[in-house]
Image: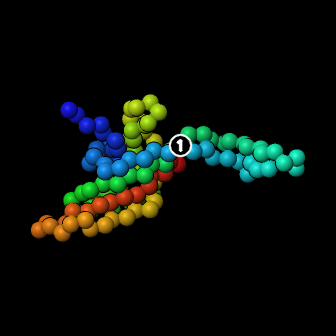
């Protein structure tokens, strides 16, 4: 049985994630809000902006790679789209990067890495 490839960074497949959460949101204009009549006015500038929360259990080799990606201003990301159930490509950046030692091993440990990917 083959696993789904959830993420690729710059064409490089990432390990199978422990968790993967895809959120779609809308970007609203400054004119969005409540009118004088008390009704809500919503001016959507862009719909379907992707935010992905992901976590991995990785070796020190992948820890180093993911840490390097977290410092880049943008990454070409192929992600598993939960709407179409296929890979889509976009440019994203990483926020909220966390690395936690899960278990000490003889080779620099097993790590839990989590972060958010945000679409431009």
Indicate the position of residue 37 as horizontal and vertical percent values: 88, 46
Relative side of 4 to 106, left or right: right
- Above or below residue 4? Residue 96 is below
Indicate the position of residue 69 as horizontal and vertical percent values: 36, 57
Quadrant of the rendered structure where residue 115 is? bottom left
Residue sticking out furthest to the left: 106
- Above or below residue 1? Residue 120 is below
Whether residue 71 appears in this view of the structure is no
Observer-nearest residue: 22 or 69?
Answer: 22
Quadrant of the rendered structure where residue 66 is? bottom left
- Above or below residue 7? Residue 57 is below
Residue at the image position 67 percent from the left and 47 percent from the top: 28
Observer-nearest residue: 46 or 6?
Answer: 6
Dividing the image into 4 quarters, which one contains the N terminus?
A: top left
Residue at the image position 76 percent from the left and 50 percent from the top: 33
Residue topped by disc 1: 24
Which color mode does the image show? rainbow
Secondary structure beneath label 1: strand
Residue at the image position 35 percent from the left and 54 percent from the top: 55
Whether residue 52 appears in this view of the structure is yes
Indicate the position of residue 27 as horizontal and vertical percent values: 63, 46
Relative side of 21 to 111, left or right: right
């Amino acid at each position: 049985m083959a696993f789904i490839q959830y993420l690729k960074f710059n064409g490089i497949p990432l390990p199978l994630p422990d968790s993967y959460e895809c959120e779609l949101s809308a970007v609203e204009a400054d004119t969005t809000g409540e009118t004088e009549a008390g009704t809500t006015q919503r001016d959507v500038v862009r719909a379907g902006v992707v935010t992905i929360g992901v976590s991995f259990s990785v070796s020190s080799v992948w820890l180093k790679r993911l840490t390097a990606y977290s410092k880049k201003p943008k990454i070409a990301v192929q992600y598993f789209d939960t709407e179409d159930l296929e890979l889509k490509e976009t440019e994203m950046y990483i926020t909220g990067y966390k690395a936690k030692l899960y278990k000490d091993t003889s080779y620099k440990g097993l790590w839990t890495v989590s972060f958010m990917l945000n679409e431009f």
